[in-house]
Image: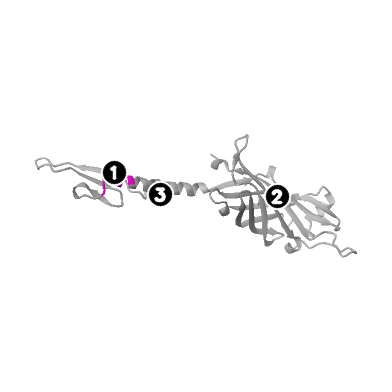
Amino acid sequence: MQRALHEIRTISLLVIPAKAGIQARTPRLRLDTGFRRYDESTGGLSCAKQMQRAVLVAIVIAGVVASAGARAATFDIDPAHTNAEFAVRHLMVSTVRGHLGKVSGAVQLDETDVTKSSVTATIDVTGIETREPKRDEHLRGADFLDVKQYPTITFKSKEVTKLADDTFIVKGDLTIRGVTKEVTLDVEGSPKPFTDPFGNVKLGGVARTKINRQDFGVAWSKSLDNGGLVVGNELEITIDIELTKKKDEAK
């Protein structure tokens, strides 16, 4: 704002009186807006119009600067109320479901054009859990996620497409086990913030995608007599997200 207003020259009204001992002349009123100098004795635009133009220009520039600053709002992912879940077929007859781990990250929300928004997220897969300790230990090992070398899964958006007021497609890079592939998230949720009973500005939604684990080097499995696999290749991922606006931006 200050930088924009700095570009508007100071408006000055100078009345130049007649000198003592010299025949008085009509006082000259000079207005310097930084765009054109007005001298009443030579005619031109009226002072009122010149001043009005300068003030309008200042208001427009100030509004543009303020609008640009207000468009990008940071919403942090709330780990306590965000869940990243997965589902995969087992023995081709049942589905194993579990939690991938704690989610952190942020959404940069463009409140005037949601398609210009972006999201980054990190999942701590050292906390992967399926309610079966031995299976969880196997999933953390080198056959699957190898969390000692690759403790996180990350996502960074590249493109946001609005399908409806509450439906979006988010494309971005997903990294698992050091391998990065582009994926598409189907997202449902409102981009309009609201205030919870505790004074926090909130957003929420759910994101879904399907990936082939083989694409990311998660290749372990065993074949069955019927030609199927012990562990299916397609992985369904669902993330229920709750976001909180940064305190210094929520005012």
Q: Position of residue 94 (x, y in %)?
A: 85, 54
In the picture as drawn, the residue positioned furthest to the front comes out as: 164
| CA separation in Å, label 1 and label 2 | 59 Å
Chain-order first, disc 1 or disc 3 = 3
From the viewer's side, name the closer residue of 23 and 141: 23
Q: Which residue is mark 3?
A: 4
Name the amino acid, label 2: Ile
Q: Is residue 121 left or right of residue 223?
A: left
Q: Which residues are magenta?
A: 45-52
In this rendering, the count of numbered labels is 3
Name the amino acid, label 1: Ala
Disc number placed over residue 48 in the picture, else none:
1
Cβ–Cβ under 8 Å for marks 1 and 2: no
| CA separation in Å, label 3 and label 2 | 42 Å
Q: Is residue 168 left or right of residue 128?
A: left
Residue 108 visible, this angle:
yes
- Its colouring scheme is one colour
Q: Which one is closest to the eye, mark 1 or mark 2?
A: 1
Name the amino acid, label 3: Ala
Q: Position of residue 121 (x, y in %)?
A: 65, 52
| CA separation in Å, label 1 and label 3 | 23 Å
In magenta segment, residue 236:
no
Q: Is residue 40 left or right of residue 181?
A: left
SS of the residue under disc 2: strand
Which of the 4 image quarters holds residue 215? bottom right
Q: Which residue is mark 2?
A: 239
In the picture as drawn, the residue positioned furthest to the right comes out as: 225
SS of the residue under disc 1: helix
Q: Is residue 21 left or right of residue 138?
A: left
